[in-house]
Amino acid sequence: MTIKSRAAVAFAANQPLQIVEVDVEPPRKGEVLVRIVASGVCHTDAFTLSGDDPEGIFPSILGHEGGGIVEAVGEGVTSLAVGDHVIPLYTAECRECKFCKSGKTNLCQAVRATQGKGLMPDGTTRFSYQGQPIYHYMGTSTFSEYTVVPEISLAKIPKDAPLDKVCLLGCGVTTGIGAVLNTAKVEEGASVAIFGLGGIGLAAIIGAKMAKAGRIIAIDINPAKFDIARELGATDFVNPNDFDKPIQEVIVDMTDGGVDYSFECVGNVKLMRAALECCHKGWGESTIIGVAGAGQEISTRPFQLVTGRVWRGSAFGGVKGRTELPSYVQKAQRGEIPLDTFITHNMPLDDINQAFELMHEGKSIRTVIHF
Ligand code: NAD
Ligand code: AHE
Ligand code: ZN
C-alpha cells in the first residue's frame, strides 16, 4: 500500500528544501521500507543542492546520513526483518560483484548505476508528489520520514544504539576515521596534516589518534574549529590566512620536509594540490576525501609524484558498510568514537534549511534532523 511521508524535497538546485507530504510506494523485490528516526546533514547534501554535482537530479529527496527502523520488507529480503535497526548505505555491499569480491575496494557496483540516476535498481522511483516522480539520492534519501532502500544498502545495527547519534556513522564520522585507518593506513608515530575541520576532518583526527599518529596538524580558515580539533587530539593548529606564503610551504617548514600523511577534507582542488605538496619527499601520501564540483580538476607538477609522493582518494573511508558498520557502532557505544562532540545542533525536519545555513556559516559541525 502506498503511504504518505513528510519529506524535505529539493525541487530545484539552489532553492530551499520544501517540506511536503510525498507518496511512498511499498518496497519491491530486494527492497526495504525504512522509517527514518534521524539524519545528519553532510556537506555533500549541500554540494548536490548547489547544482555542482554532475549526478544531482531534481526534484529529489536528499540525505544520506540516517538511522532508522525497518517498517516492511519486499519479496526475497532475507537479511532484515521488520523492527530491525539500520543505517542506510550510499555505498552498498552485495558481497557478490567483482568489486566486493576483489578484496581491494569497498566500492560495490551492484546498484551504483541506477543509484546515480536517482532510481531504484529496477529503474523506477518509489517517491512521488502530486502524481509526479521524485528521485532518490545516493540510494538513501534520508530526509524523508519513510524511504525505500535496497537490502544490500542497509547495515543492521544493535537496537540499543541511539539512532539519533549513530546516524552520523552513515557518512561523516566513518568516512574520516576510515580514510585514515583503511585508505592511508597511518602508522604509529606518523605525522598527519588534516585540511578542513568539518565533520570529515574532525573524524580524521579521531582516526589519526586511533592510529597513534605522532603529530596531528589541523588546518582550517575558520579558527573557531580549533577547539574541537584540540579536544579530539590534534597537536598543531594552522590558519592559512595567517601566512603570506603557500600553506604547503608552511607545513613543510613546520615538519622538517613534510608530513607522512595528509587528508583533504574540503573539496577545494587548490587545497588538494597543497595537501599533496605538503607531503614528505620520497614517501608522503595524500588522500582526497573532499568532493569537487563538476568540471573541476586537480593538478600538480608530475615531479611531485616522481619524487615519491602518492595521491589517493577515499569514499566512505574504504568501509564495507554491512560488514564493518556494526563494529563502528560498538566503538561509539564504548565511547571510543565521541559522536556527541560532532552534534552541535538538533532540530526537527521543518527547520532543515537552517541546518544548511549553519553549515555554510561555519557554525555547525553536524546538525541532526529528528523526525
Ligand atoms: P564542512 O562544511 O562541515 O567542513 C568543511 C571545512 O573546511 C570547514 O570547517 C571550512 O571552514 C573548511 N575550509 C573551507 N575552505 C578551506 C580552506 N581553503 N582551507 C582550509 N579549510 C577550509 O564539510 P564536511 O561535511 O566535513 O565535508 C567535507 C568534504 O568532504 C566535502 O567536500 C564533502 O562533500 C566531502 N565528503 C566526502 C566523503 C567521501 O566519502 N569521500 C564523505 C563525506 C563528505
Ligand atoms: N556524484 C559526484 C561525486 C560525489 C562523491 O564523490 N561522493 C562520495 C561520497 S560523498 C558522501 O558525503 C563517494 O563515495 N563517491 C563514490 C561513489 O560511488 O559515489 C560526481 O562527481 O558525480
Ligand atoms: Zn556525506
Image: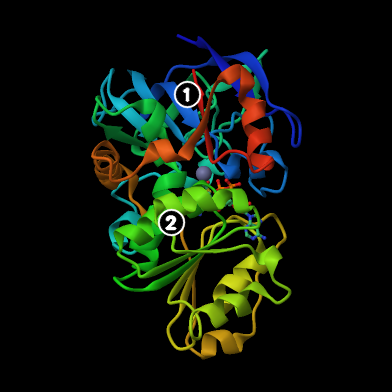
Q: Is residue 105 visible?
A: no
* Front in this rendered view, residue 114 or 340: 340
Which is more foreground, mark 1 or mark 2? 2
Question: Which residue lies at the image location 63% right of the left edge and 62% below the top edge?
Answer: 239
Q: Quadrant of residue 192?
A: bottom left
| Residue type at the position of mark 1 | Thr
Mark sitting earlier along the chain (1/2): 1
Classify mark 1: residues with Cα within 10 Å, few (<14), some (14-19) or many (20+): many
x and y percentages locating residue 56 in the rendered image: 66, 42
Q: Is mark 1 within 8 Å of ligand 3?
A: no
Residue 230 position (above or below residue 36): below
* Front in this rendered view, residue 48 or 56: 48
| Residue type at the position of mark 2 | Ala
Q: Quadrant of residue 77?
A: top left
Residue 128 position (above or below residue 293): above
Q: Quadrant of residue 66?
A: top left
Classify mark 2: residues with Cα within 10 Å, few (<14), some (14-19) or many (20+): many
Q: Is mark 2 within 8 Å of ligand 1?
A: no
> What count of labels does the image hold?
2
Q: Image check: 242 left or right of 283?
A: right
* Residue where numbered disc 2 is placed: 204
x and y percentages locating residue 57 in the rendered image: 66, 38
Residue 214 position (above or below residue 61): below
Residue 232 position (above or below residue 26): below
Q: How is the image coloured?
A: rainbow
Question: Which residue lies at the image location 30% right of the left edge and 26% below the top edge?
Answer: 85
| Circle 2: element type | helix
User: Looking at the figure, which quarter contains the N terminus?
Assistant: top left
Q: Is residue 71 visible?
A: yes
Q: Image check: 162 left or right of 123?
A: left
* Residue where numbered disc 1 is placed: 147
